[in-house]
Amino acid sequence: MDVHADSLASLWPLILYGGAAFVLVAGLLGVSALLGPRTQGRATREIFESGIVPIGEARFRFPAKFYLIAMFFVIFDLETVFLLAYAVAARSSGWAGYWEALVFIVLLALALAYLWRAGALEWGPKAIRAR
């Protein structure tokens, strides 16, 4: 038997499962479209949160500082994952791995110091920061 035909024959359960899932989803959407309510009352499009009538607009802008801090968190969090991977392989990497991890940590500390010095980590109003 051909290797290609053998690998294709082992995929038939996956193809059958995908087809069954597609048919099930399409069927449920079709049944809900046929049997679902068609009324558009006044409260149909109203925002409803735990029985509390909303006050004000739900869509408000976050300051750019929020996204900046979020990006810093993700970047430094990923760097922590790299350091944890080093910690797992510390014995097998030897002194060369130790020095590379030390350089990595120093570069992270310098980046954090730069961000701190540039004021990228400041949250408070400018009057408070001036003190």
Image (cartoon, rainbow, N blue to C red):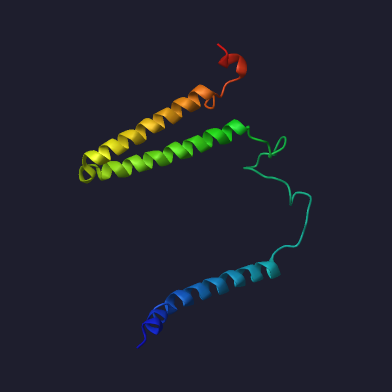
Image x and y of residue 48, in percent: 67, 45
Q: Who's the residue at 53% across and 33% down the image?
A: 69
Q: Who's the residue at 69% across and 39% down the image?
A: 59
Name which quarter of the figure residue 9 lies in: bottom left
Q: Quadrant of the C terminus?
A: top right
Which residue is outermost to the bottom? 1
Image x and y of residue 73, in percent: 47, 36
Q: Who's the residue at 23% across and 44% down the image?
A: 93
**Which one is nearer the viewer's eye here, 117 or 68?**
117
Which residue is outermost to the top? 131
Identify whether 45 is placed above or below 32: above
Q: Who's the residue at 50% across and 27% down the image?
A: 115
- Horizontal side of 26 relative to 103 (left or right) equals right
- Horizontal side of 64 relative to 56 (left or right) equals left
Image x and y of residue 104, in percent: 36, 36
Q: Quadrant of the N terminus?
A: bottom left
Total labels: the figure holds 0
Image x and y of residue 122, in percent: 54, 23
**Which one is nearer the viewer's eye here, 108 or 14?**
108
Identify whether 50 is placed above or below 12: above
Name which quarter of the figure residue 3 lies in: bottom left
